[in-house]
């Protein structure tokens, strides 16, 4: 396996962790939601992290760029919205 795939998997890992943490923060700010309820809901999204890393390691090279771009665009959109 090429070195760039491992580097891309590391970047994907960081992007997905940031995305899950941002989702947890937005759930925590909802009125009437406790910290435990937000953590439970965010843990469902945390399942995407190993799936995303495995996908980056297994898909063809052009699809890696798509898998990296999607969470980066979502994080950018969430940053501009706040």
Image (cartoon, rainbow, N blue to C red):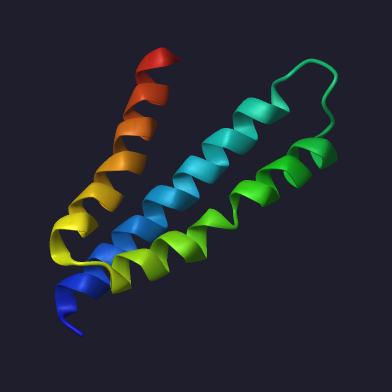
- Quarter of the image with the C terminus in it: top left
Residue drawn at 73 percent across, 41 percent down: 41
Residue drawn at 35 percent across, 23 percent down: 77
- In this view of the protein, which residue sits in the foreground, 59 or 50? 59
Instruction: Reply above or below: 63 against 59.
Output: above
Instruction: Reply above or below: 9 against 16.
Output: below
Label tally: 0
- Quarter of the image with the N terminus in it: bottom left
Residue drawn at 26 percent across, 74 percent down: 6
Q: Residue furthest bottom?
A: 1
Tell me residue 28's x, y (percent): 71, 29
4 relative position to 50: left or right:
left
Asked where in the image residue 80 lies, by quadrant, the reply is top left
19 relative position to 5: left or right:
right
66 relative position to 48: left or right:
left
Tell me residue 34's x, y (percent): 84, 31
Asked where in the image residue 63 lies, by quadrant, the reply is bottom left
Tell me residue 37's x, y (percent): 82, 37
Tell me residue 24's x, y (percent): 63, 37
Instruction: Reply above or below: 53 against 17.
Output: below
39 relative position to 16: left or right:
right
Residue drawn at 42 percent across, 59 percent down: 52
């Amino acid at each position: 396996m090429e070195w760039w795939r491992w580097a891309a998997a590391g970047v994907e890992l960081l992007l997905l962790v940031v995305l899950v943490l941002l989702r947890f923060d937005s759930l925590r700010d909802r009125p009437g939601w406790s910290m435990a309820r937000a953590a439970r809901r965010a843990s469902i999204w945390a399942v995407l992290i190993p799936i995303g890393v495995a996908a980056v390691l297994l898909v063809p090279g052009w699809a890696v760029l798509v898998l990296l771009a999607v969470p980066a665009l979502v994080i950018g959109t969430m940053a501009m919205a706040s």
